[in-house]
Amino acid sequence: MFFKIRRDTLIILLLAFILIVCGRLIIYVAYASSAEVAEGVPIAGIIVKGNDIVPIDSIRYNVQNSGLREGSYIDGDILKTSIRELPVTEAEANAEKFVRRSTIPGTKIAPIAGADVTVNRDTGIVTVTVIEDFSTINITGNKTTSSDNSNLEKSTSVYNYSIAG
C-alpha cells in the first residue's frame, strides 16, 4: 500500500526532518561542551508568614541584605554570596536581626517583636515567620503638627483634598 506524495511535499518533509535533527544535535553539543559547575543549591525565593502591617517587600529586602538573596547558593553548611562566604546559621541569625528592624513605610515604627528565619538546604527556599506586636511600641512621644490653611483659596475641583488636616 503506497501513498502518492508529490516531489515538492517530500522535499519539504525531508528539510523539516533535517532541521529538527540538526537542532537537537546543536542543543546536545552545547550542553555537552558546557563546563560543569557544582555550586550547590541556589536561593530560590523568600516566603513571608505572619505579617499584617509591615509590607512583604520591606521584609524581603531586609532578608536579602543578610545575604539570602537571588544569586547566592548553599554549598553544604556555607552560604556563598558574590561578596563573602558565611555559615548558613549565621546568615539566618543576621536575617532575623534585619527583619526585626523592618519598619512601617513612612514611619520609624518597627512593630516586629520576633522573627524566625529558616533555610531549606535542599530546595533553597527561605521561610520567614514574623510576629508583629504593637503593645511594645511607644508611640506617645510622636508629635503631629497642624498648619493654618485659612489664607488658601477654596478649591473648585471635584477632588477636594486637604493637604494638612
Image (spheres, rainbow, N blue to C red):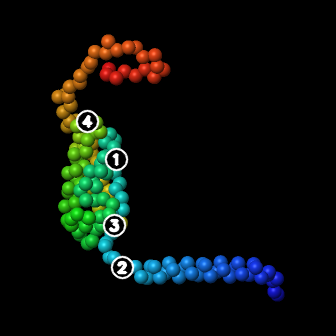
Density class for disc 4 (Cα within 10 Å; few <14, some 14-19, many ≥20) is few
The residue shown at (32%, 12%) is: 151
Cα–Cα span, label 2 and label 1: 36 Å
Inspect the image, locate mark 2, and give the three-letter code of the amino acid beneath it: Glu
**Residue 68 spot, x, y in % from top left:** 28, 59
Is the C-beta separation of discs 4 and 1 under 8 Å?
no
Q: From this view, report whether residue 46 is shown above or below residue 111.
A: below
Q: Residue under circle 1?
A: 56
Name which residue lies at 45% across and 22% down: 159
Quarter of the image with the C terminus is top left
Which of the two discs, 2 and 4, labels the residue nearer the N terminus? Answer: 2
Residue 31 lies left or right of residue 60; in this view the side is right
Under mark 3, the amino acid is Pro
Q: How far separated are the C-alphas under marks 3 and 1?
A: 21 Å
Please give the name of the residue rendered at 82% of the width and 87% of the height, measured from the top-left corner.
Answer: 1
Judged by depth in the image, the label closer to the viewer, 4 or 1, is 4
CA–CA distance in space, label 3 to label 2: 15 Å
Of the numbered discs 3 and 1, the one sitting upstream in the chain is 3
Residue 62: percent from left, percent from top: 26, 51
* For discs 2 and 4, the disc positioned in front in the rendered view: 2
Residue hosting label 2: 36
Front-most of 77 and 82? 82
State the separation of the CA atoms marked 4 and 3. Answer: 34 Å
- Type of residue at label 1? Ile
Residue at the extreme left:
141
Residue 88 in view of the camera: no
Which of the two discs, 2 and 1, sits closer to the camera?
2
Q: Extreme top residue here?
A: 150
Instruction: Provide the secondary structure element on which disc 4 rests.
Output: loop
